[in-house]
Image (tube, coloured by chain):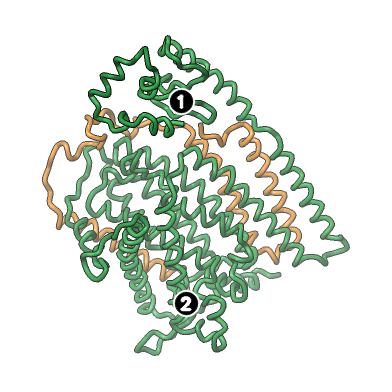
């Protein structure tokens, strides 16, 4: 097949050739307005919803249902002092939030809100999409990757410890989850045959890819939450560990841009998810049958698109209201050892399946046999690899045992003459407290030992109970069941 | 012919304008009161000890992740055009790509077994 026909196939389905400069500027302004208003709404939406999930009201004073709450919040940020910390690299410190917000604004350029529609009060008929190109998905991934620079440079240029840690965490996180995200999209490209977003939407006329490519969707969904640093993957911010992560040293509008970028990025990845997996602007199934696809024309598609988009936003908030933050090692393990292998395997499965569908009669070879044989060999290799014990496990166990041996010796030395027996983990063995590894037991708490030993420490216990500020001391029984 | 990147340039210009305008506005509208403590690095109230930039240290593991990332990113770069031209490249592309994926998977498994993907 010649390159030109290939180009014609992968080209966007939407026709932008009639767009004048004025229309383009109008669409660009509309996108920016849409994003800014959406973020204002998303802030209210999230606070309100989280409030409901936590049995409280959320903001409900400013405006009807508290809808206007975000406006004074935004204005307050604008009117705050713009601090540049002493240790900062001034230029990059200023540049970083700008990169962040810039890349967040750019993604919606390739998102189709709908098919061609007439702009009200004019005769202009144009696709409800700023632009589209044969590499739109690549563009989206590139711009998202650019957004990481905002976080990395912001954390680094602050010249402060917490932001630096937040930014290196963020880099590792985003690049890890970007891989599984882009691998998940490969199978969509195989079945759609194009990277143009309008073409991907057009390819979903009969079936949404979420049904046909469910594993790819699951991988994409998990990675998109990791990509935008939202709970349960909000380790770059992790306010319990890193204060505010990369944005600790930022104030005023610079902070506001980071905040805005975070919410716009949620909208971005949701919009990509809707476009790629949920049929974009297409009406859901029973509705799409009404009146010969009447609901897929004109301005109706914008409604379906927004409904799908905000359903995804709801899921983001829901996750935040439900899940706890991952520990960093769990998080990296999940990304590299689960998501990426699954995504890769799925790409191969889809490719082989599509190959079986498309190229069965080529030459004299019996293609299916070869492909099945190849798949069988791959599967066998994968099985063998999965059954082999991990080298890390072998190395780790003796080390652990040794460690807990030392810990026990210390423990015995410390609590000489106490009733404490068995292997206990000394949290302070290394000079600072660490949590126990799986399989290690913490010694019973000193308080409990004192309460349960009748003779030896009775004076101590008596002293404590007279001091008696802790309510737990009053109820030793319940305390014990908690510890167990 | 319609150039799809013209609207992107327009949007980029507007976005930059908005971003820079916001920063400028807060500079103009916000107060400017100097305070020695305020511009110090934030370390939960204690005196900041050292400058994190340049001298700030972080685990070498992050470099390892970045190195592995490059390998896979290149793989993805090759997978994308192949996925788009899947039907045209037909059986040749499919076999070549599966071979490529296997070639990438072998060092990945090696790194995994050597514990390169373990964080602690």
In screen coordinates, is A325 left or right of B89? Answer: left
Badge 2 is on which residue? Answer: A114
Chain letter belonging to callout 2:
A
Q: What element carries label 1?
A: loop
The answer to whether residue A85 is above or below residue A223 is: above
Residue drawn 56% across the image and 57% down it:
A218
Q: Is mark 2 on a helix, strand or loop?
A: strand
Quadrant placement of the N terminus of chain A = bottom right
Residue drawn 45% across the image and 66% down it:
A311
Where is residue A419? Give x, y as percent.
45, 15
Quarter holding residue A2: bottom right
Are dots 2 and 1 on a single chain? yes
Q: Distance between the residues labelled 2 and 1?
A: 59 Å
Where is residue A434? Give x, y as percent.
42, 27
Chain given the colour green: A
Q: Is there a contact, CB below 8 Å, between mark 2 and mark 1?
A: no
Q: Residues within 10 Å of mark 1 (few under 14, many from 20)?
A: some
In screen coordinates, is B107 left or right of A140? Answer: right
Badge 1 is on which residue? Answer: A442
Residue drawn 34% across the image and 60% down it:
A52
Where is residue A438? Give x, y as percent.
53, 31
Chain given the colour orange: B
Residue B3 appears anywhere in the view: yes
């Amino acid at each position: 097949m010649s390159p030109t026909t290939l180009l014609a196939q992968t080209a966007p389905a939407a026709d932008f050739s009639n767009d004048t400069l004025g229309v383009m500027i109008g669409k660009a302004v509309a996108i920016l307005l849409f994003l800014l208003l959406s973020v204002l709404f998303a802030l209210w939406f999230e606070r309100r919803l989280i409030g409901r999930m936590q049995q409280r009201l959320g903001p409900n004073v400013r405006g009807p249902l508290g809808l206007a709450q975000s406006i004074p919040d935004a204005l307050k940020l604008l009117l705050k002092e713009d601090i540049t910390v002493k240790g900062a690299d001034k230029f990059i410190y200023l540049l970083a939030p700008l990169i962040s917000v810039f890349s967040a604004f750019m993604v919606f350029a390739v998102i189709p809100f709908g098919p061609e529609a007439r702009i009200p009060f004019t005769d202009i008929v144009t696709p409800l999409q700023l632009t589209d190109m044969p590499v739109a998905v690549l563009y989206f991934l590139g711009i998202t990757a650019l957004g990481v620079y905002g976080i990395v440079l912001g954390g680094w240029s602050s010249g402060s410890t917490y932001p630096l840690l937040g930014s290196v965490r963020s880099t590792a996180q985003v690049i890890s989850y970007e891989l599984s995200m882009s691998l998940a999209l490969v199978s969509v490209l195989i079945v759609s045959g194009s990277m143009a977003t309008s073409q991907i939407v057009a390819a979903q006329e009969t079936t949404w890819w979420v049904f046909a490519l469910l594993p790819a969707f699951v991988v994409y969904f998990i990675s998109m939450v990791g990509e935008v640093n939202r709970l349960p993957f909000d380790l770059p911010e992790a306010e319990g560990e890193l204060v505010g992560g990369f944005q600790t040293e930022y104030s005023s509008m610079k902070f506001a841009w980071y905040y805005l970028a975070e919410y716009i990025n949620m909208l971005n990845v949701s919009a990509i998810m809707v476009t790629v997996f949920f049929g974009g602007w297409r009406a859901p199934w029973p509705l799409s049958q009404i009146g010969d696809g009447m609901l897929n024309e004109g301005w109706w598609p914008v409604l379906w698109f927004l409904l799908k988009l905000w359903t995804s936003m709801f899921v983001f908030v829901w996750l935040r209201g439900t899940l706890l933050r991952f520990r960093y090692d769990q998080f990296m393990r999940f990304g590299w050892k689960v998501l990426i292998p699954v995504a890769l395997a799925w790409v191969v499965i889809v490719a082989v399946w599509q190959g079986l569908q498309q190229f069965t009669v080529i030459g004299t070879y019996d293609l299916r046999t070869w492909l099945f044989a190849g798949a069988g060999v791959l599967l066998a290799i994968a099985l063998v690899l999965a059954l082999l014990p991990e080298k890390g496990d072998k190395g780790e166990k003796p080390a652990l045992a040794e460690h807990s041996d030392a810990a026990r010796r210390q423990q015995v030395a410390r609590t000489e003459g106490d009733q404490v027996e068995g292997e206990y983990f000394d949290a302070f063995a290394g000079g600072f407290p660490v949590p126990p590894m799986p399989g290690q037991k913490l010694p019973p708490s000193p308080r409990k030992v004192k309460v349960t030993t009748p003779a030896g420490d009775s004076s101590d216990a008596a002293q404590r109970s007279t001091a008696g500020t802790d309510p737990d001391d009053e109820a030793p029984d319940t305390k014990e069941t908690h510890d167990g | 012919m319609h150039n799809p990147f013209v609207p992107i340039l327009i949007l980029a210009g507007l976005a930059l304008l908005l971003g820079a305008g916001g920063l400028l506005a807060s500079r103009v509208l916000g107060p400017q009161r100097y305070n020695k403590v305020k511009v110090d690095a934030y370390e939960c109230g204690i005196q900041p000890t050292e400058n994190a930039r340049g001298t700030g240290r972080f685990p070498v593991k992050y470099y390892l992740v970045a190195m592995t990332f490059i390998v896979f990113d290149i793989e993805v770069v090759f997978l994308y055009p192949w996925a788009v031209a899947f039907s045209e490249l037909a059986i040749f592309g499919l076999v070549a790509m599966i071979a490529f994926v296997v070639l990438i998977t072998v060092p990945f498994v090696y790194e995994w077994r050597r514990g390169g993907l373990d964080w602690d």
